Amino acid sequence: DLMREALGLKELEAALQQQLNIERVVVVAGDSDRSPWVKKEMGRACVACMKELLEPGDIVAVAGGTTMAAVAEMMTPDPKLHDVLFVPARGGLGEDVENQANTICAKMAEKAMGRYRLLHVPDQLSDEAYASLVEEPAVKEVLELIQSCRMVVHGIGEAVTMAKRRKTPPVEMEKIIARHAVAEAFGYYFNEYGDVVHKVKTVGIQLEHLPHVEHVIAVAGGASKAKAIRAYMKRAPHSLLVTDEGAAKAFVGE
Ligand code: F6P
């Protein structure tokens, strides 16, 4: 903690807490846009928060992305996590396998020596196929587990970057751009005011569920995500934010 004080991280945390009007912020040293190890440091900090807040028997819903992959990588076993169940926060969002919530959920649970359940819902489905799939007992059961989670851990992305990474069809891409989306989190695209301007169709945690989830941890850093984090946080005041100095300084400097 003395080290963190010397680096001025505590001050950055206090400034961010006030600016973003959220309860708790953890800032790690460095900028993940420039140094890849900083993402792992955010992962480590997130794991510490998870261990502090989780209780045996809890269900944790985890999202996808490279930052969440770093959280999974930094996960370590803990007696408290022994009886924790890990589930993916949402179904397919168009990510490559290594960035999918299912993959990350399984890896995180293995590292924690906890349990996991996966959600097998393809990305592209007709409305009819969709409607019948969610009635399948195996899918329905996992969806119910997701909806009763006590913690959600997720990443935040820059809107256009995410839309490109997911190979979003041109029509949707135009909509995302025309509506000035700046942020994305678990399938929702937000403008700078935090309004939802587009949503990827899939099952799992919905934005409306978040206020009822006891602990929501958002993990996102890098100066390039500053705008996205600010926009998204307007919608998620009871979240805990794990970020880095790069993003934090970009806010404070504004
Ligand atoms: O697609 C899953 C997801 O969690 C998005 O909701 C988020 O925008 C993105 O990944 C973050 O990815 P990364 O951590 O790689 O920037």
Image: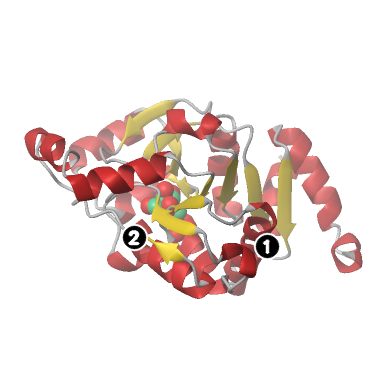
Residue located at (48% from left, 44% from top)? 149
Residue type at tag 1: Ala
Circle 2/circle 1 CB separation < 8 Å: no
Residue located at (73% from left, 43% from top)? 24
- Is residue 156 among what the camera can see? yes
Residue 110: name its quadrant.
bottom left
Residue located at (12% from left, 43% from top)? 125
Q: Which mark is residue 127?
A: none
Q: Position of residue 95 (x, y in %)?
A: 30, 57
What coloring was used for the rendering?
Answer: secondary structure
Residue 187: name its quadrant.
top left
Residue that numbered label 2 is attached to: 102
Q: Nearer the viewer, residue 84 or 240?
A: 84
Q: Which mark is residue 48?
A: 1
Q: Position of residue 115 (x, y in %)?
A: 43, 64
Q: Is residue 44 left or right of residue 167?
A: right
